[in-house]
Image (cartoon, rainbow, N blue to C red):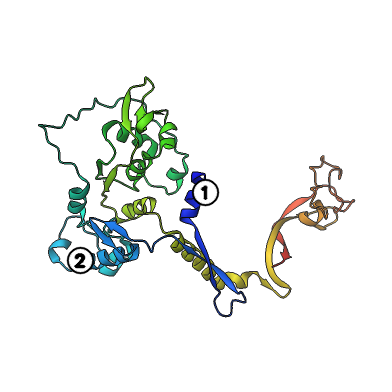
């Protein structure tokens, strides 16, 4: 099975269940994002991801009651419930993260100068990248750096499993880059080659690094910035996303549907048309009615000065020059 199909089946597990009473349907589709499976976090195993979230939210709630914890420089001004609502601990907290030391202890590699032979030459290469990537454009932020540029530094200085620290993370492009270096296709798009055993090769064939995800610790004084970064990196469960999206659509429909209700039914679409005035006969000409035929073929053409040639059949033949009236005309289509 192609990898794309496998990913879709993994993300979109559907099942038919009885529909809600009054919905006039027998069945409805529910989405299962696999959140019922056991998850491991910081060396602990939980029944599912929701249990993990509940456990760490309660631990964070306890820490927020500690006056010394709140004295940490840069602690956000806000109520406990607001901080908890924004947080998804231990991965992301809208305040200083009390689990950073545990994270480093679990994933870090202590440096031993007696046995480690780590050495990298200073990185000197062109890292200019365009700012038209969909990931970059998903959310604007000042001084934002394209993640593709950061990927080159991560590949040069680190190996899979290393921890990358960004103390001025902004909206998390370093975190995105650290995840993207696990994708061979994304690395090849940078101009590198992938050899056997997932080695990353430069243009001259020398080994530069290895394909594989790096861990990241992202910090910023702005809770807004770290919140956006968390949404870049902690993708929501498909079932939760679908529920939230449908809930938002239903809410908007209830509040604004009256704008599109008419005696004949629901207004499915509308066209706002210009209105032109003939100074010779005083007639108003609706562009939509005059310039379009029943089969929606555009008939209007720009006319020569002093001549009616070029007007559609809906324009009065005795009209010469016409002027645009600063008043629109709306025509609507009724439908389901």
Residue 238 placement: quadrant: bottom left
Front residue of 140/166: it is 166
Query: Dot 2: what SS?
Result: helix
Name the one closer to the observer, 76 or 124. 124
User: How far apart, in angstroms, are the residues tagged by discs 2 and 1?
Assistant: 44 Å
- Seen in the image, is 109 located left or right of residue 223? left
For disc 2, the marked residue is 64
When the figure is inspected, residue 93 is found, relative to residue 182, above or below; the finding is below
> Is residue 78 in view?
no
Q: Position of residue 312 (x, y in %)?
A: 84, 49
Decide if residue 90 is on the left or right side of residue 331. Answer: left
Q: Is residue 304 visible?
A: yes
Image mark for residue 5: 1
Name the disc covering residue 214, or none: none
As drawn, the residue found furthest toward the right would be: 317
Element at label 1: helix
Give the vertical position of 189 relative to 45 (above or below): above
Q: Residue at x 20, y 56 (%)?
A: 99
Measuring from the top left, give residue 31's x and y in whole percent: 49, 63
């Amino acid at each position: 099975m192609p990898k794309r199909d496998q990913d879709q089946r993994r993300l979109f597990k559907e099942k038919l269940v009885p529909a809600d009473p009054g919905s006039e349907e027998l069945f409805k589709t529910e989405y299962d994002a696999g959140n019922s499976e056991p998850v491991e976090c910081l060396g602990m195993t939980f029944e599912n991801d929701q249990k993990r979230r509940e456990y760490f939210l309660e631990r964070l709630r306890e820490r927020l009651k500690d006056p010394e914890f709140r004295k940490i420089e840069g602690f956000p001004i806000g109520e406990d419930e607001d901080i908890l609502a924004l947080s998804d601990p231990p991965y992301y907290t809208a305040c200083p993260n009390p689990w950073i030391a545990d994270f480093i202890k679990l994933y870090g590699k202590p440096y031993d100068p007696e046995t480690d032979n780590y050495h990298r030459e200073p990185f000197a290469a062109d890292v200019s990248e365009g700012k038209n990537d969909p990931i970059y454009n998903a959310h604007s932020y000042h001084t934002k750096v394209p993640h593709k540029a950061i990927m080159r530094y991560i590949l040069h200085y680190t190996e899979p499993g290393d921890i990358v620290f960004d103390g001025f993370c902004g909206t998390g492009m370093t975190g995105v880059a650290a995840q993207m270096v696990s994708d061979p296709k994304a690395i090849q798009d940078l101009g590198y080659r992938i050899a056997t055993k997932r080695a990353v090769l430069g243009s001259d064939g020398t080994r530069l690094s290895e394909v594989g995800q790096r861990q990241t610790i992202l910090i910023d004084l702005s809770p807004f910035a770290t919140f956006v970064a968390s949404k870049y990196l902690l993708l929501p469960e498909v079932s939760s996303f679908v529920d939230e999206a449908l809930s938002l659509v239903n809410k908007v429909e209830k509040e604004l549907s009256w704008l599109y209700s008419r005696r004949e039914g629901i207004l499915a679409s509308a066209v706002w048309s210009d209105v032109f005035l003939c100074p010779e006969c005083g007639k108003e000409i609706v562009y939509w009615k005059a310039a379009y035929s029943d089969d929606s073929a555009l008939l209007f053409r720009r006319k020569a000065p002093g001549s009616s040639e070029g007007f559609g059949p809906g324009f009065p033949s005795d009209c010469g020059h016409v002027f645009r009236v600063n008043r629109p005309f709306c025509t609507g289509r009724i439908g389901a």
